[in-house]
Amino acid sequence: MDNKTTQLRSYDNTCRSTINAVITITALCIFTIAGCQQQGRGLLGEKRPLTKDERMKWWRDARFGMFIHWGLYAVPAGEWKGKRIDGIGEWIMERADIPVSEYEPLTKKFNPVKFNADEFVRIAKNAGMKYIVITSKHHDGFCLWDSKVTDYDIIDASPFKRDILKELSKACKKQGIKLCFYHSIMDWHHPDAQRPFYPNYNDTKQSNPNFARYVDNYLKPQLKELITNYGPLGVLWFDGEWIKDWTEPMGKDMFNYVLALQPNIIINNRVGKGRKGMEGLSKSEEYAGDFGTPEQQIPATGLPGVDWESCMTMNNTWGYKSYDHNWKSTKDLLHKLADIASKGGNFLLNVGPTAEGLIPGASVERLAAMGEWMEVNSESIYGTTASPLGKVSWGRCTAKPGKLYLHVFDWPTNSKLEVTGLKNKVKKAYLLADKKRAKLSVRREDEDKVVVSVPSEAPDAINTVVVLEIKS
Ligand code: FHN
């Protein structure tokens, strides 16, 4: 073998090993980058802020959560000095013009010995809820955890002496439910906040010259306690932002402050001043907050690209009132869940525990019934997106890639379910409740409409889900 060939051969080998080396290094880089991406780390392993999509993923898939309004207001339960006080129960201090000196003694009567954190979480999980948002501190200023920043809390002021948020944090971890905290910016108990506004604690024209001190020496330190001692949290759900002393720049600063404490946390739009009243959506993306918060209402249509969550009571109050029995029906609640999911939103459904520490029976019953429906149909809620079909007469529709979930509230008397606005080819149709996935016959009526032949009886009178596998 002459010299030239040997040189060429060795040159050839060098090329080959160089190419292999390059391929290996490239592959390594790709894997490293991917790995880092996933962990929210930069190339050098440094922590990088997660993108909003990365932070919101679990929340967008979850679709259904439990709101818990619990605190001292459960003791009077809507009555003060023998008189029934109108309005939502957690506002009794403001509605009955109760001075702090008369409200504080409620701490001595708040002793929820029947409270069982595992049971609270079990009730939520069994209903199909994926996260819990509990009032760490509502407008009345009482704290449901052992705060080092005040004695106006469950450990220092009440005979209960158990840290409710600590017990819930453990129970949520155990049962795989995301724990989230509601926290009121407005505070009727703190002298640097709205306490001096008595009797109009909610006077939005008044200002407290020491409010900045409340923010720096009380609000922020308490949020640090909650995030660092009870986290990681799913969501920080602010409220009470409508007070005069709270501004959008403060909201933006608070957003960054909280995100710095826990980079993957989600923060609602009541951290800033962007909320359009009870409609709850943000005036524009300029305002701080990750998602809109419609209250006691559902947007009329889907809102592509907008994250939003409707929060709602099961009766007419958030905090417990002994005589409010105006409970929504299970049918109404399940229809609302499908309606909200069909518009790309989340449903945050409230319970108001009693002063003994029990979730009212009427709430437990309805949540258990919702859980039975979710047991069979949760595939048509979790991880779905808004309906691509316009308004449908028989119910709602949710979607996943290649699948439509038709939520039929009004079963066709002629067993012919008409689906308009559907151009895609339907590959298969079946009842979600039918484990065998027996095929339902589908006839295309015109380029925009198909008719699905369904059984004469609706398998579920409240909401029967028909699945269409479609060509995307
Ligand atoms: O004033 C509160 C009210 O008590 C309750 O907490 C609701 C829940 O979203 N938010 C405020 C009213 O908008």
Image: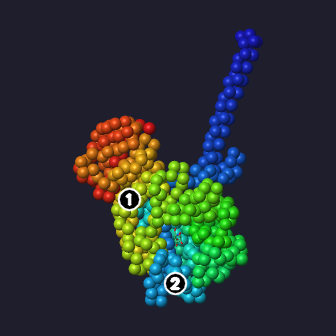
Direction from residue 147 to residue 435 in the image, left or right? left
Asked which secondary structure carries label 2, the reply is loop
Q: Which residue is mark 1?
A: 335
Amino acid at dot 1: His
- Is the residue indicated by label 2 positioned so its CB lies within 8 Å of ligand 1? no
Q: Residues within 10 Å of mark 2 (few under 14, many from 20)?
A: some
Residue identifier under label 2: 96
Indicate the quadrant containing the C terminus: top left, top right, bottom left or bottom right.
Answer: top left
Q: CA distance from mark 2 to mark 1?
A: 36 Å
The kind of residue tagged 2 is Ala
Q: Secondary structure at mark 1?
A: helix
Residue at 56% over, 62% down: 276
Q: How many marks?
A: 2
Q: Which residue is at 54% across, 50% downward?
A: 305
**Is residue 295 shown to the viewer in this render?**
yes
Residue 159 seen in the figure: no
Q: Earlier in the sequence, mark 2 or mark 1?
A: 2
Q: Position of residue 143 (x, y in %)?
A: 58, 76
Using residue 350 as the reference point, say whether residue 140 is left or right of it.
right
Where in the figure is residue 4, as x and y percent of width and height?
Answer: 75, 12
Among the 4 quarters of the image, the one containing residue 266: bottom right
Mark 1: is the Cβ under 8 angstroms from ligand 1? no
From this viewpoint, which residue is outermost toward the top?
2
